[in-house]
Amino acid sequence: MIYSNNPRPQSIQSLVDAKPVPFWLDDPARPTPEPGLTKDLRSDLLVIGAGYTGLWTALLAKEQNPTRDVVLLETGEVATGASGRNGGFVDASITHGFLNGLSRWPREVAILEKIGEANLDAIENTIKGLGIECDYRRVGEIDIATEPYLLDEFKEITELAEPYDVRFRLIDREQLYEIVKSPIFLGGIKRPGSSLVNPAQLAWGLRKACLERGVQLYEKTPVTKLEEENDLVIAHTPHGRIRANRVALGTNAFPPLLKRISYYIVPVYDYAIMTEPLTSSQRDSIGWHGREGLSDGNRQFHYFRTTADGRILWGGYDAIYHWDNGFGPHLEQRPASFARLAEHFFQAFPQLEGLRFTHTWGGAIDTCSRFSPFWGTAHHGKTAYSMGYTGLGVGASRFGALVMLDLLGGRQTERTKLEFVKTKPLPFPPEPLRSVGIKLSQWSMRQADENQGHENFWLKVMDWVGLGFDS
Ligand SMILES: Cc1cc2nc3c(=O)[nH]c(=O)nc-3n(C[C@H](O)[C@H](O)[C@H](O)COP(=O)(O)OP(=O)(O)OC[C@H]3O[C@@H](n4cnc5c(N)ncnc54)[C@H](O)[C@@H]3O)c2cc1C
């Protein structure tokens, strides 16, 4: 079934009481922010941005060398960027899925899959070891077909993955109905290894671990400029400067501090809505007691999951790019996208008609043309960056942090030898070509969804030159 894009009045009505804030941040466990920086400082390692990338970098730097002097600066509060507003799917893949890895790094994909699984194990061990309460569960993720041709695609992926020892499991319509009841779900493919987490609570747990290990955290402290001065990099903030030996950038889709990054990244806004907690009879009507992470397999896809207190998060589908890398809090609410999401939700779960939504929000995704992270250095190797996760960075950000530490330490490791790490995505063209190209790609993806997955000439050319678009 193709989702209808015309929201009915009752779908719009279901949103009227929703708070315009990310559900995960509307939590009494949200920590009081640390004071901002008001003096000049000297540090060995300065980390900029306190989402997962920055938090993992600071924490792993301390693990590698507990006496190392680490400062972490954050323009807002920990997790107020994408890390506190995502779907909480912790994918084992660091390449934005096995297929993307296979098509771009065919000779490395087997090792990249193994690294991804080890990375997920390490995240799980950290959560357990530090006792982080973040509703972490290794329940696996199921991609769902709402059109018969997707079942054929799933079969093909399973066969392609087999020689690489990547475990996918096909699920037929009856088996899927046992897991989750929807009249439009035709079958699925399960990646058993993946996990789900409460994303903000994970970030806050990492924040606590950083503070306990002596990381100096300053929130409400934007870095406005970086400049090189002999052997140091100077970071300017409104009320103090930091002179650092090494700088790690984890600023994701935010306006970058290095101009070169803006060629590789486009901020694309993704939106989500959260229901009120379901009653037990509503829950019984849909099943889903295993609380698996779900998404549909279309090019314009939804992701959906349950929460510890029995709600459903429903997000995705629209991916909105604004002219000239438009960015800011004014873009985080989009009533047209929320109405469409609510309509699609009730098409998937008509038995929940009458359920209300309590939260609506959006956030920017650091989209790059290879859909997976990339790295680089500046200031003669004294600054490093890790970004480009393209909507799949909850797990991959830990690997990204390790690569940055390798690069800043000048170390040749198993990681830095990978083509995946050494290469960069193709840059996006400047405006107006950037907007035109993205709009054309989005239109073509919608067409492909409506035409049994058949890609038009534009998508084929984009695939062929390696200049993709995804959210
Ligand atoms: C709606 C949505 C849903 C998503 N769902 C998923 C999902 O289910 N699974 C998944 O794997 N990924 C998902 N993602 C992507 C995932 O959230 C990101 O890849 C991940 O959080 C990236 O972490 P980060 O630390 O690099 O970025 P962020 O969390 O965005 O952190 C960057 C931080 O840098 C700070 N900063 C920026 N500039 C400066 C500056 N100049 N000075 C100081 N601080 C600065 C920002 O304030 C911010 O806190 C989703 C993203 C969105 C928006």
Image (spheres, rainbow, N blue to C red):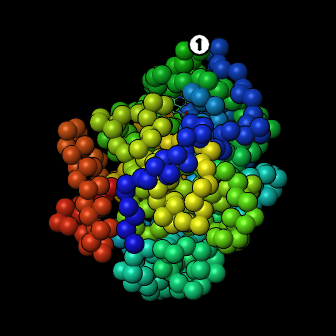
Q: Residue at x 55, y 73 (%)?
A: 182
Task: Say which residue label 1 marks.
Answer: 239
Ligand 1 sits in quadrant: top right
Q: Residue at x 37, y 45 (%)?
A: 320
| Quarter of the image that includes the C terminus | bottom left
Q: Dot 1: what SS? A: loop
Compared to 355, does 334 lie above or below? above
Task: Tell me where residue 273 appears, x and y as whole percent.
Answer: 55, 49
Compared to 170, does 245 lie above or below? above
Q: Can residue 241 be seen from the camera position used here?
A: yes
Q: Residue at x 56, y 77 (%)?
A: 190
Q: Nearer the viewer, residue 192 or 355?
A: 355
State left or right for residue 22 relative to residue 419.
Answer: right
Task: Tell me where residue 235 appears, x and y as whole percent.
Answer: 52, 23
Q: Can residue 206 be seen from the camera position used here?
A: no
| Ligand 1 lies under 8 Å from the Cβ of mark 1 | no
Q: Residue at x 48, y 31 (%)?
A: 329
Which quadrant of the view contains residue 395?
bottom right
State left or right for residue 369 relative to residue 269.
Answer: left
Task: Tell me where residue 286 appears, x and y as whole percent.
Answer: 64, 70
Q: Nearer the viewer, residue 424 or 243?
A: 424
Q: Nearer the viewer, residue 108 or 56?
A: 56
Tally of numbered discs:
1
State left or right for residue 322 relative to residue 356.
Answer: left
Which quadrant of the view contains residue 108?
bottom left
Task: Tell me where residue 82 appears, x and y as whole percent.
Answer: 54, 43
Q: Nearer the viewer, residue 389 or 115?
A: 389
Q: Residues within 10 Å of mark 1 (few under 14, many from 20)?
A: few
State left or right for residue 301 relative to residue 468.
Answer: right
| Quarter of the image that includes the N terminus | bottom left
Kind of residue indicated by mark 1? His
